[in-house]
Amino acid sequence: MALESGNKLNLNIEEMANAGLNFGHTVSRLHPKMKHYVAGIKNNVHMIDMEKSAKDFENALKYIVSLVKDGKTVLFVGTKVQVREFVKQTAIECSMPYVSERWLGGIITNFETISKRIAHFKDLQNKKATGELEKYTKKERMEFDKEIESLENKFGGIKDMNKLPEAVLIFDVKKDLTCVREARRKNIPIIGVVDTNIDPDLVDYIIPANDDAISSIKYILEKVKEAILGSK
């Protein structure tokens, strides 16, 4: 069964299952509000109903499409070690900002202060590129290089984000709960991959799926990329 829209979202339930989106967590870790999405149990693990998941996933993709068509920004957030590079690469391909290292408190709720740090980072980058740092000693230049590297890790993915995003796309709601809380405080809609151990009420647009398997996240990222690039 495939679910499609005018934007050719091409969600195929069999492909979703093959990518491992249907594997939830162990039975003991079920969040009560995720019972609706459980289709059964296999080897003491809850299996997510892919038909229900596909419908919600399609709804989330349609929302992303609507944002992109209006020129809006979606901030990708995926800091889990095994998926951060995939999240980063996809965000770059989609020309969207991203946070793939640790979420820094205040990115959303204290954006003005964060913006000042980003301005300092870009200024240092520019000075290095134009040779302005050559007048310093070798030791001082090494210190500047260390600072630039540190700032790149912290702000590299959001250095061109000149305003708050219109939505955030979170790939592990539990790990990046601080981001969830900040977005909710600022009334920024949250699109989130929600596994069976997560409260689905934390997000506005739910993608019920395995948030641990690389294959699952890669599939979700690919469909998000298709939706975004197909809307530009």
Image (cartoon, rainbow, N blue to C red):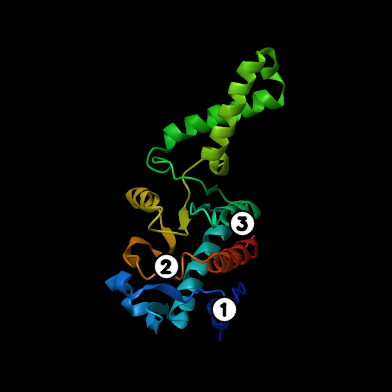
Up/down of 180 relative to 55, above or below: above
Q: According to the image, label 3 marks what residue?
A: 90
Query: What residue is at 41 percent from the left and 81 percent from the top?
Result: 43
Kindly identify the amino acid type of the residue bearing the numbered disc 1: Asn
Up/down of 2 relative to 211, above or below: below
Kindly identify the amino acid type of the residue bearing the numbered disc 2: Ile
Up/down of 44 relative to 119, above or below: below
Helix, strand or loop at label 3? It is helix
The answer to whether mark 3 and mark 2 are in CB contact below 8 A is: no
Q: According to the image, label 1 marks what residue?
A: 18
Helix, strand or loop at label 1? It is helix
Helix, strand or loop at label 2? It is strand
Q: Position of residue 28 (x, y in %)?
A: 30, 72
Query: What residue is at 46 percent from the left and 45 percent from the top?
Result: 102
Q: Is residue 7 left or right of residue 177?
A: right
Graded by Cα atoms within 10 Å as few (under 14), some (14 to 19) or many (20 or more), the crowding at tag 1 reads few
Q: Looking at this rendering, what residue extends furthest in the bottom direction?
A: 1
Q: Looking at this rendering, what residue extends furthest in the front direction?
A: 43
Q: Which mark is residue 206?
A: 2
Q: Position of residue 118 (x, y in %)?
A: 52, 33
On-image quarter of the N terminus: bottom right
Q: Earlier in the sequence, mark 1 or mark 3?
A: 1
Q: CA distance from mark 3 to mark 2?
A: 19 Å
Q: Nearer the viewer, mark 1 or mark 2?
A: 1
Q: Earlier in the sequence, mark 1 or mark 2?
A: 1
Graded by Cα atoms within 10 Å as few (under 14), some (14 to 19) or many (20 or more), the crowding at tag 3 reads some
Q: CA distance from mark 1 to mark 3?
A: 21 Å
Q: Position of residue 196 (x, y in %)?
A: 37, 71
